[in-house]
Amino acid sequence: MDVEQCVALVTGGNRGIGEAFVKVLLEERHAAKVYVGSRDEAAAASLVAAFPGRCVAIALDVTNDIQVRAAAERCSDVNLLVNNAGLFTNQLLIGAADMGCARAEMDVNYFGPLAMTRAFAPILARNGGGGIINVLSAAAIVALPNMGGYSPSKAAARMLSTSSRAELKGQGTGVTALIVGSVDTRMAEHVQGAKEDPRYIARVGLHAIERGVDELDTDRMAIEVRAALNLDPKGLEKRLAKLLHATILSTGR
């Protein structure tokens, strides 16, 4: 698809990578309009003020079926959907007190994009096919034990990307999965080392959907994780297990 002059909806668009997508679309790619999906419309007020008439805030919790349906009815001109909203609870799978956090991560990170894709697929078809970008994680290609239910939920979303790509091919809708590593956002505050600018992730993601790329490693960390996985999967698993136990020893959780 051609991103120039598109009409986009970005979930979780009020901060982090989502906000970067909104700004890059409006400032650099001359989008006609961008809907900013956020659980609290007021959280996107600064974006709406910065781009009057072209940036529209909508109340959107991707786990709320009523709000998802309302978004589809209101945003009937969309031809690019960016499934960015995500949740990381920083709890272990087995060590957590219960399964509440794991269920919440699966609800937001997998069922949320699924619900949005189902709701907007007919809209994209009517508007020429368009595209869907699913913002995933390096945790989708290798299990990160210290991140609990986050890895399983992102791995499920990766499979969702593959399945929906096949189902929507006939209507001309492209689906691109972004494998994101270390990015300078609030969600990645716990990650040590260099972090990529969220705007860079947005730029390469938009280029990927335009080129029809199915899956893209967006930054150095993501590339290094995939390389390590291909070179020595068992060795990588052992190193991640050591990281988990080091985390438990240092935090007591």
Image (cartoon, helix red, strand yellow):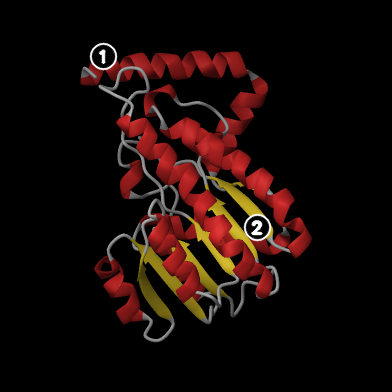
Q: Secondary structure at mark 1?
A: helix
Residue at numbered disc 1: 249
Q: Secondary structure at mark 2?
A: helix
Question: As displayed, is residue 153 above or below residue 229?
Answer: below
Q: Position of residue 16 (x, y in %)?
A: 37, 56
Residue 132 as seen in the image, left or right of residue 251: right
Q: Is residue 182 left or right of residue 253?
A: right
Q: Quadrant of the C terminus?
A: top left
| Residue at x-position 59% and y-position 14% | 234
In this rendered view, identify the residue nearer to me: 240 or 160.
Answer: 160
- Would residue 45 be visible to someone looking at this image? yes
Of label 2 and label 1, which has the lower sequence position? Answer: 2
Distance in Å between CA atoms under marks 2 and 1: 41 Å
Identity, as a three-letter code, of the amino acid under mark 1: Leu
Q: Nearer the viewer, residue 242 or 72?
A: 72
Labels in figure, total: 2
- Which label number is shown at residue 83? none
Task: Estimate the x, y position of residue 35 in percent, counting from the top left.
Answer: 44, 72
Q: Which residue is mark 2?
A: 208
Does residue 33 lie above or below 61 as drawn? below
Residue occupying image coordinates x 54% and y 75%? 76
